[in-house]
Image (cartoon, helix red, strand yellow):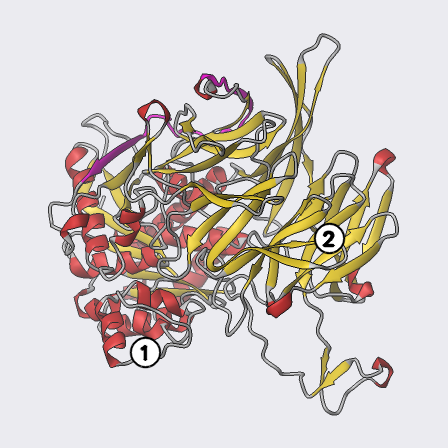
Amino acid sequence: MFRLKQFEMLITSQICIRTCPATLLHRLPAFYCHLERSFSKMEKVTQVYKDVFKVPELKGARIFNVCQNENGRHRVMVKVKMSHRSLCSKQRIVTAQDFVVEGDDVLSFPAISNDKDIQLMQQGRKHTAYVMKNQVKEKDGQKIVIVGPGTQMSEVDLTGMNLHGKVYTDADLSSLEWSQDETKLVYVAEKKRPKATSFFGSDEKSEGKDAPGTEFLYVSDWGEQMEGQSVGVVCVLDVTSMQVEVFTLPQNLCAGQVVWMDQGLVGVGYKTQPIHLGLIYCPNRESVIFHLDLKGNYTELVGPGHHVRSPRVSPDQKKFVYLRYTVGGPHEKCAQMCIYHLATKQDRVVIDTVPREIKIVEGYAFKGMYGRTIVPQQCWASDNERVLFSSYKLDTVVTYVVNTANGDITELPHVGSHNLLNVYQDWILVHQTTVTQPGQICLAQLPPRKEERSIQLKTVFKIEGPQGMQPHWHSHFNFQNSTPHPKPEYSDIPISVIYFGPTSQTPEEAKRPLICWPHGGPHSIISNSYSSLLAYFVSLGYSIVVPNFRGSLGFGQDGVDSLPGHCGNTDVSDCHEATLACLKRFPDVLDENNVFLMGGSHGGFLSLHLAAQYPAVYKALVVRNPACDVSGMTTATDIPDWTYVESGEAYRIGKIPNVESLSKMYEISPLRHIDNLKAPSLFLIGKNDKRCPPFLGMNFHKMLLARGVETRLHLYDDCHPLLEVEVEADSMVNAALWYSKYRTN
């Protein structure tokens, strides 16, 4: 009945009412067959989407206790959190599952769904703390809930206390950490401001606490996905008295990543003056590391002049390691790992930036430290010398052990990518995954110093992938672009290619269309790790080529530095050569007449460039919030520095683009090549995107319409990544239908 109604609606909309009856009867059978095929495709792509996205995503895992049983064997308790997309409720549902590991035995308990109002959680030895939504009188508030021994529960209405603004729950600034004795809890929240009111509506009972005339005052924040986060303050909850004390940092620094150390606190303070720049995905903003005692005495330990982050305190509470980056330049780059000794105030480099690669223990190559979350909160061995971390080595995530005393780095054995999750009393958790398999959570005991490579992993939990996905459906290779780089010293930097799909098939099987899928950033990477988005299109019968072009992470700092000033040139050439290399390597599998493009942000930038510069190769494209007009971005994005750096110019805060700057930005933009773009183009745009402003994508779409190019635009109530459950589902199903429309077999 539902399908019949849809047919009626489509027939009414597609066939002109003035068509004569004889013509209508003549057209109806063919039109009905067309509709039948359309609905068949729609049902297939939606069903495959449901099947593939049943596979949950790992949200986190940690070891929460280690003890010995009556036989002297270690008993290790592990908690794994998974995120599930619910198409019915249009939200992500988080489940938690506990495991007990004793030798070769793994005991699992049923997974439990977390309360959807939980925003942060921290489990201590005796207590568990939650930051939760607290809706009171139709107003969104927050509260902290403490669950103690015997499931005793206490709660604090933070909104009712009115000591600060919203608690931060993002990945860059948030904290929720127990003191060692679990009598205090630290978190970060927005600084309290006077209540903004009208000149004519001030509350007489406010006793001067209102701020009349500020109802429409603009307060700058940290941009994309961090709306309302401007200046963070340190908050300490005493769980005995259930009182909160708030500490404001000097010089209007924004607090973040606060942890306990030696009866005090260590955290990161981000400069907010003179202006905020976008923070998410940008570990190049100036910051300091500070110490704060519980009387509010502030001491700057590290900085300024660098971007510093991720302080990780040793078990003996005497020192911490942290990551240090240069300020400005490319947003993502190679980092230093440094160590700071609290008593002596000694600060030194443990791992330096790596231009290309260095040789480490047993002659393995090390490409450097990359990424904003490569060092988990718990990363120290119990000897107070060794630290574990993960980083990119070409297109693979590898886990390493560094001896902070002498700088020795050891690569741990791995199959596929191994992402470090947690270290606890010399037991470690890693996530083992490949592009074809969601992978498994593995547990191991860290061997003694100099024996780390003898580590033995034990599978705790396996994440089952979608049916029909074959583990061998992938290939990896590196190549050098035969076209010389404008700077010859960068010509020999390799391009890493991940191919996802069958590598062989019988002559009777139809050849598969190929999707070129460049990553965003541009200083980012798509690693040899499972992605439901990629798996979705492979399950629909496509193969995918992922080109990690020069400028990607994992190739040394030279790899990063090779791209600024050459965007729209070398990165485009690298991606196109990777596509041609796949077509040449797998001629019996891939259909050279059905090559498509998919990309978001800088990946959308590249997709538009590729379609315009090589119009004979690419049949259709889908772009998500593309950086399509760099000159138009520069005064509208939350990261204006990006537009200068990637076009080859230096940036300083407050810089106004001149004609020469705007000309360079325009020269690298896809907009410059719009007259050559003929491929049908689908735009997926988030109207709340502060990174790639939506009006630029909308304008590009209109300019294509004016040129007679087939194009369509979907506008979503979402931000840059387009990851809201309903948005992601609609956009990817529409993308699949778009490709299907222009696929010739």
Q: Residue furthest bottom?
A: 200
Residue at left offset 52%, top offset 38%? 54
Depth order, front residue of 62/533: 62
User: Given the current orientation, which residue lies at the most extreme front position?
Assistant: 344
The quadrant holding residue 121 is top right
Q: Residue furthest top?
A: 71
The amino acid pointed to by label 1 is Pro
Q: Is residue 608 magenta?
A: no
Is residue 616 shown left or right of residue 554? left
Identify the secondary structure beneath mark 1: loop
Residue 455's disc is none
Question: Which residue, given by chain and number where applicable, does mark 2 sit on?
Answer: 132
Which quarter of the rendering shows the C terminus? top left
Residue at figure coordinates x 34%, y 50% from the top left: 519
Q: Residues within 10 Å of mark 2 (few under 14, many from 20)?
A: many
In this rendering, would 719 be left or right of 395? Answer: right
Look at the image and say whether residue 462 sits in the magenta stretch.
yes
State the image coordinates of residue 606 (x, y, percent, origin top left): 27, 57
Q: Earlier in the sequence, mark 2 or mark 1?
A: 2
Q: Is residue 714 above or below residue 408?
A: below
Circle 2 or circle 1, nearest the eye: 1
Which residues fall within the magenta stretch? Answer: 454-479
C-alpha span from label 2 to label 1: 44 Å
Q: 326 left or right of 66?
A: left
Q: Position of residue 435 (x, y in %)?
A: 38, 35
The dot on residue 657 is: 1
Q: Nearer the viewer, residue 93 or 51?
A: 93
Residue located 29% across and 51% down the image? 551
